[in-house]
Amino acid sequence: RQAIYAGLRDVQATTRDGTRINVMINAGLRDDVANLNLTGADGIGLFRTEFQFLVSATLPQREKQTRLYRDVMDAAGDRPVVFRTVDIGGDKTLPYLRHDDGEGEENPAMGWRALRVALERDGLLKVQARALLEAGAGRKLNVMFPMVAEPWEFDAAKAVFDGQLDYLRKRKKVLPEVIRYGVMLEVPALAEQLDLIAPKISFLSIGTNDLTQFLFAADRSNPKLAERYDWLSPAILRFLKRVVRTLDGTKVDISVCGEMGGRRLEALALLGLGIRRLSITPAAVGPIKELVGKVDLGEITVAMDGWMAAPPADLRAEMVAWAAARDI
Ligand code: PEP
Ligand code: MG
């Protein structure tokens, strides 16, 4: 199989009936970028910028951030990179970032984290915004905000970028050629406000790791719950289908960047729901490209429609049989 995957490195993922599927990788460190060439992925759909903060003993200085972002874009070349602003706080605490309410939140995953921290600690997002804008000088820059629950949170974060853009413009600095802003869909509340956020954004990436923990009210880090709920559950799949349908006809690009997209059966389900962009762990790129090449999109779309209208008792078993019958 390894040989098959290696052979697919220079092959673009295209379904049997001819639809191009975007297969990108998740990354977080400078060295991860080498995986782009190793896998032949279409870009970095999620660059977790907090990794630099987590491996550092002190808050990374702006110049250091700029250097990392520039190196990553240099290495990616023509391929897009989506930089997610820091998702720290909660369980990813930093010794050098003081928490006002002391240590130990009761529910860190739904606590003071991600954009909630970045917006309150304005300096944090300001510095990161400037670093990203400087690194993106003369290029296309993609910025994504994590854990957005309400459209105003996106507005507030974007205003920080606009402020830094003004600063650079006044000093006659070279600005990014294009800036595309997007959000992660991880908090179910945002799904009820897609019509409100859609006109503001260029893309939306579904973070199925956090989204599932919030949909099922099941801590993603609790091993007792790890096997309890299935990604192939109508709860998630119908939810995702509704998101795809709601954004259909808008200019918003949808992708999935959670672990779900890197698993074969789950990826098959996502294709059937209308997802055409996946950002996954590098090791999954080969297997997912191979899967895509075997899938007839028309066929899986009809099958998913049927399963969503009347879910079988065990959808996973049903899908295993469906895939086996087609040598997928
Ligand atoms: C997610 O929540 O699905 C996601 C991709 O972000 P992270 O795993 O970094 O929380
Ligand atoms: Mg997340």
Image (tube, grey):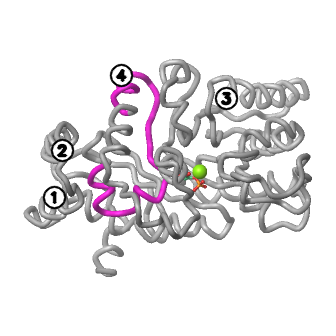
Q: Is residue 98 left or right of residue 79?
A: right
Q: Earlier in the sequence, mark 3 or mark 4?
A: 3
Under mark 4, the amino acid is Gly
Residue 46 x %, y %: 57, 52
Residue 289 x %, y %: 32, 62
- Residue pictured at 54% horizontal, 30% vertical: 190
Span of residues in magenta: 244-269
Which element is circle 1 on? helix
Residue 4 x %, y %: 28, 76
Q: In the picture shown, does residue 138 fall above or below 40?
A: above
Between circles 3 and 4, the one closer to the viewer is: 3
Distance in Å between CA atoms under marks 1 and 2: 9 Å
Question: Which label number is shown at residue 249?
Answer: 4
Between circles 2 and 4, the one closer to the viewer is: 2
Distance in Å between CA atoms under marks 1 and 4: 31 Å
Residue denoted by label 1 = 318
Q: Mark 1 near mark 2, Cβ–Cβ under 8 Å?
A: yes
**Ligand 1 near label 1 (Cβ, under 8 Å)?**
no
Between circles 1 and 4, the one closer to the viewer is: 1
Q: Quadrant of residue 168?
A: top right
Nearer the observer, 114 or 203: 114
Under mark 1, the amino acid is Glu
Q: Quadrant of residue 303?
A: top left
Distance in Å between CA atoms under marks 3 and 4: 22 Å
Which element is circle 4 on? loop
Under mark 3, the amino acid is Phe
Residue denoted by label 2 = 307
Distance in Å between CA atoms under marks 2 and 4: 24 Å
